[in-house]
Image (cartoon, helix red, strand yellow):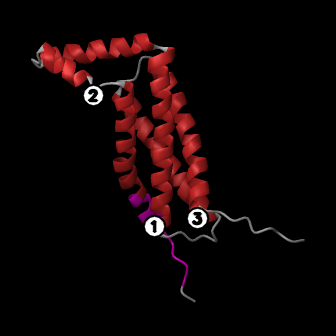
């Protein structure tokens, strides 16, 4: 009986786990929105733990299927791709949700933000300018930037912990 050597690559693993993470992030967004928990700090911590868990699972999957070896660079690359793919997917969903599915919720969020700006003393002109940066599209951009920054930190720490280099001989 022969076994096929299935080629596993960092990008295949990252894409698979990134897609699943994106779907889970969408589910979490829907649940937290329906339960009115979007601004709950415990939910944000939980979401970050899920994010880290997907990076760990992806790196572990690659390592387990690569004879138990993974370099720091491979682990970092997998983690960063999982982060970016998952956050882009969930960010695109949020644009669709706020623009097409529930634009009233976006208006409510914007009213809360404007009320905070008024408390801080911003005038109408400053608030109108600031609103250019508080759009669903801007949320996607910030999501991608967050994925790059935080994803890099999470990924390098996880990769450093889980790395195991092949022996030279």
In the displayed structure, 142 sits above or below 16; it is: above
Of the residues under marks 3 and 2, which one precedes in the sequence? 3
Report the residue marked by disc 1: 73
Report the residue marked by disc 2: 133
Which segment did they paint magenta?
156-167
The percent position of residue 63, horizontal first and vertical second, equals 58, 64
Asked if residue 45 lies in the magenta stretch, the reply is no
Q: Which mark is residue 63?
A: 3
The percent position of residue 124, horizontal first and vertical second, equals 14, 13
User: Which element type, helix, strand or loop, lies under badge 2?
Assistant: loop
Image-based side of 45 in relation to 25, left or right: left
Image-based side of 81 in relation to 11, left or right: left
Asked if residue 162 lies in the magenta stretch, the reply is yes
Q: Nearer the viewer, residue 24 or 46?
A: 24
CA separation, marks 3 and 2?
41 Å
Q: Foreground mark, 3 or 1? A: 1
In the displayed structure, 129 sits above or below 49; it is: above
């Amino acid at each position: 009986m022969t076994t096929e050597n299935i080629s596993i690559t960092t990008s295949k693993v990252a894409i698979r786990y990134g897609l699943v993470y994106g779907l889970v992030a969408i589910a979490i967004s829907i649940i937290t929105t329906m339960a009115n928990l979007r601004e709950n700090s415990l939910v944000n911590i939980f979401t970050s733990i899920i994010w880290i868990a997907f990076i760990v699972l992806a790196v572990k999957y690659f390592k387990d299927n690569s004879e138990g070896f993974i370099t720091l660079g491979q682990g970092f690359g997998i983690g960063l791709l999982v982060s970016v793919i998952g956050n882009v997917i969930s960010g695109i969903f949020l644009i669709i949700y706020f623009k097409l599915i529930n634009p009233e919720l976006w208006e409510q969020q914007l009213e809360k933000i404007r009320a905070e700006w008024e408390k801080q003393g911003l005038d109408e002109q400053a608030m109108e300018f600031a609103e250019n940066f508080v759009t669903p599209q801007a949320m996607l951009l910030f999501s991608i930037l967050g994925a790059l920054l935080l994803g890099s930190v999470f990924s390098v720490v996880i990769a450093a912990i889980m790395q195991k280099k092949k022996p030279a001989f």
